[in-house]
Image (cartoon, helix red, strand yellow):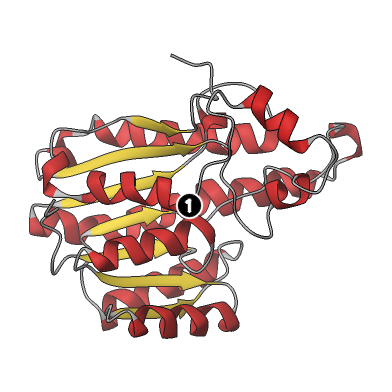
Amino acid sequence: MDLKLKGKKAFISGGTHGIGLSIAKNLGHEGCEIIFCSRTIKRLNFTLDLLKNMNISAYGYQCDALIREDVDKCINIVKDEIGGIDILVNNVGGGGSWGSEDITNTDEIIWHQVYEKNVTAAIKFTNGFLPSMVENNWGRVITITSTLGIEAGGRPWFNIAKTAQTALMKNLSKNKMFVKKGITFNCIAPGPIDIPDTGWAIKKKEPKFDEFIDTLIPMGKLGKPEDVANIVSFIASPLAKFINGSSITVDGGTSTAF
């Protein structure tokens, strides 16, 4: 299927690992020009080389999403060097396994850092790139949230942050000033996704892990980053023009929310 994305400029925050990297590759294969940011130069350079070896036009910028000045600087450099963005994927985030299950033994800084990395970064990138979408009468803002952004469970700082991201996209999807300009706002809510160097990678080493997964996930297996990326590419496309304000789960049936 031709998703009609050739020539679109897509910015992916945290686009060098796991879901973000898979989204970058997927959108790149659809003909998008890929712009991404990463906290570490090592991952940034690795991803640039990887994408360019795939004949994908790519630009990478160093940015720590926990530092507001870094995010502002990244946005301004992208606008100066690349120009307007057609597709924004707010992917950077995390924190679901940070701290302790006992909130009284978790430093308050964890609450703030998880909120900053997920919500504040999404707000800043959205505000930064929306004006060019309005000017072009077309745009996509897609935020990678979590099933824990639509139902209870998990550690509260993560629930709060992901729920706030979901509320942000839903609220903007009702704003006629933007949506009548052909801009849509949607969430993709992953469930258990097998990503190296994350909480699930650690859990895989535990006894009876397979039994645990079979009980947790109706399909009996973890998802892959490309399962999320495939949905992102469709939602980013002109074919999804009437999908606005949705939160689409990619979780193998794990969540219990309607």
Residue 227 locus on image (x, y percent): 41, 46
Give left or right: position of 124 versus 245: right
Residue situated furthest right in the rendering: 105
Indicate whether 258 appears above or below 65.
Answer: above
Q: Residue at x 52, y 31 (%)?
A: 147
Give left or right: position of 50 versus 215: left
Per the image, label 1 sits on a secondary structure element best described as helix
Quarter of the figure with the C terminus: top left
Residue 230 seen in this snapshot: yes
Q: Residues within 10 Å of mark 1 (few under 14, many from 20)?
A: many
Identify residue for label 1.
Answer: 225
Give left or right: position of 47 versus 198: left
Indicate whether 82 appears above or below 201.
Answer: below
Residue 182 locus on image (x, y percent): 11, 44
Q: Residue at x 49, y 33 (%)?
A: 251
Circle 1: residue type: Pro
Q: Residue at x 29, y 60 (%)?
A: 129
Residue 230 locus on image (x, y percent): 33, 49
The quadrant in which residue 162 appears is top right
Give left or right: position of 58 versus 32: right
The quadrant in which residue 99 appears is top right
Residue 44 locus on image (x, y percent): 51, 79
